[in-house]
Image: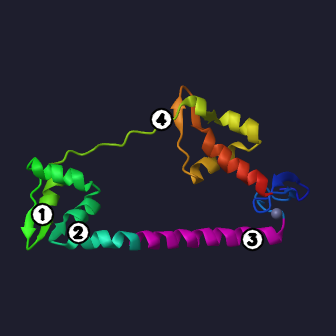
Amino acid sequence: MSSNLRINRICEQCGKEFEARKTTSKTCSNDCAKKAYKARKRAAKIEVSNEQVNRIKAKPLEDLRAQEYLTVDETARLVRISRRTLYRMNERGELVFMKLSRRTVIRRSDIDRLFDQAKPAGAPEPVIISLSECYTMKEIIQKYGISDKALYELIRRNDIPKQYSGIYAYVPKIRIDELLTSAASQS
Ligand SMILES: [Zn+2]
């Protein structure tokens, strides 16, 4: 490609407009390129550490799963059912409570059996947001002057739910406004 090629771009690091010499340039300067690289590294590290935290948080539940007998409280936590519901299940004869010395306990095998009998819940219902609370892609592009590609990337990276009506995809206004307004006020 010609070295005289000049393309106006927005620096992904500082947000300033710059003349790119290559179509692949994403940052305005070496300094910004270094910062962008570090930011990416940092984001990757945070992801790893979040995973570790989640693993540690899940630990006590794993311990509960290994126990032969559980208290009503432990059962409630393990299966995410309220104590009240557990007592009602006991009254209906669906779940046996046992007395172990003075404590009321539930056999883990009985809890497991509950799940064997339960019907699969199926796919969760999608959350439907009224279309009047949504933007089309075109509306976002017009309002914020963002590129097609940047918009799709933004939606993907932030897990913004899309819903379709006819040929149009709709995304919740509140999520888009939140993301793009804060990005604009940072530069
Ligand atoms: Zn820059």
Looking at the rendered structure, the kind of residue marked 4 is Ile
User: Which residue has dot 1 on it?
Assistant: 109
Q: Which percent across, then down, holds residue 50?
A: 50, 69
Q: Which percent across, then down, holds residue 40?
A: 65, 68
Tell me the mark number nearer the camera, choosing from 1 and 3: 1
Q: Which percent across, then down, holds residue 79?
A: 26, 58
User: Which residue has dot 2 on it?
Assistant: 65
Question: Which is more N-terminal, label 4 or label 1?
Answer: 1
Spatial CA distance of label 2 from label 3 is 45 Å
- What secondary structure prevails in the magenta region? helix
Looking at the rendered structure, the kind of residue marked 1 is Ser
Placement of 153 over or under 130, stated as above or below: below
Q: Nearer the viewer, residue 134 or 28?
A: 134
User: Which residue has dot 4 on it?
Assistant: 128
The disc placed on residue 35 is 3
Question: Which residue occupies 80% across, 54% down?
Answer: 10
Spatial CA distance of label 3 from label 4 is 39 Å
Spatial CA distance of label 1 from label 2 is 10 Å
